[in-house]
Image: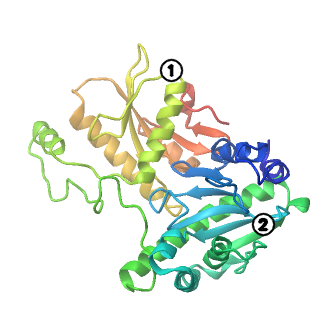
Amino acid sequence: MDLGDYLRTIASDYARDSLDSPGHVLLKDAPNVLGPLLPGGLVIEGSGGKGVPTLTPWIGVFDPDETDTPQAGIYVVYIYSADLSRVVLTLNQGVTKLRQELGQREAIKRLRADVAAVRAGIAPAGLTGTVADVAFGVNRPLQRAYEAGNICGIDYDLAALPSTGQLEADLERFVDLYQQAVGVKRHLLLSAPGTISSPSVQQPAGGGPATDPLREFAPKSDSDYVAHLSGKRLVKSRRHETLVKQFGDHATALGLAPATNVHPRDMTLAPTGQDEWLVEAKVVYNGNVTQAVRETIGQLLQYRHFLYPTGSSVRLLGLFTEPIGDAYVALLESLGIAAVWKDEGGWSGSPSAMSAGLPTGP
């Protein structure tokens, strides 16, 4: 089922007297429908309500470094109108926690102020073709909050949806805008405290800022390095951990044996009767492929040198949330590093990764 058919069928099969209607079942299948269209490390959830069916079902895309819930933080979401004739793709903000803390009226006021601040920090070209005002056809507190929290949106008539290609391009564009909006928000939180009402919901896994445990460390020997790393905790972001889990599930389905309890390494893969893969995972933030590739090279070569005996055979693999481009694929291959990335339709990879059977996508 393509994206357009999926969005239409949810509306036509959605019932307001049951949480088990075919439309509700389709909403729960959102990770399988949207997942192949999106970069790695994102969390996808569809909901028709909890306890009772909602008037405006939704499908959310969450960056777990920002939030994994529609209750707070910025996220991308499809929200249906109350009459189910339209669906809005919106870069929105969670309101539940603000409403609980401040009440409806003040929460709406704060949301609108946050929207103005974030929109002002996004390049105008990025907002071209989007709308600042959306409506969901019902005067209820939650839906009014959705309207106030809209940073930008595209309003679709379900009877006249654009092509599947355009829908997918719009979704990809909104995920890019998502990263920009979160960057603007975090800059404002640091540079102008009080401008934004709610911080990013999530902190790096384990809490606290992500610091380099090897800063100002000059190991005298391999054993010195290993001993130092063994006593340090590497703080990983939640999106990073989500990416590792997603690829680990994929590797397991291929019959491999992924291990993530191999500190400080992100993951190892142990194919039966073959050399172990040493895997380094990287989230590509705001399209900065250069930084992700550079860090991957450094860490893989460093870990191979210090953590594996001289002369041992270990294969190196860089894992990325999205495509890194042919030039960087060639660079990694020239260094003996295979690459796999999340791509439309599944996992794709470099020639050496493909020959090893790691990706399954095009």
User: Where is mark 1, residue-wise?
Assistant: 255
Residue underneath mark 2: 81
Q: Please provide percent x and percent y for residue 137.
A: 79, 73
Front-lying residue, 178 or 270: 178
Left or right: 290, with 35 as reference point: left
Give the residue displayed 60% in from the left and 68% down from the top: 177
**In the structure shown, which secondary structural element does the residue marked by tag 1 occupy?**
loop
1 or 2: mark nearer the eye: 2
- Hey, what amino acid is under mark 2? Ser
Specify whether residue 151 is in view.
Answer: no
**Residue at the spot 40% in from the left edge and 53% down from the top edge:** 294
In the rendered structure, find residue 125 and report the number of the disc placed on it.
none
| Circle 2 SS class | loop
Please state the horizontal and vertical placement of residue 215, each as a whole percent of the image: 19, 58
Identity of the residue furthest to the top in this view = 273
Which amino acid, by three-letter code, is at mark 1?
Answer: Gly
Question: Which of the two residues, 58 or 120, is positioned nearer the viewer here?
Answer: 58
Q: Is residue 46 left or right of 205 when viewed as pictured?
A: right
Quarter the C terminus occupies: top right
Where residue 95 sits, quadrant-wise, is: bottom right
Q: Residues within 10 Å of mark 1 (few under 14, many from 20)?
A: few
Q: Residue furthest right?
A: 159
Which quadrant holds the N terminus?
A: top right
Residue 315 image-quadrant placement: top left
Query: As displayed, is residue 111 above or below residue 336?
Result: below
283 left or right of 302?
right
Residue 212 is at least partly visible in this image: yes
Judge left or right: residue 351 versus residue 20.
Answer: left
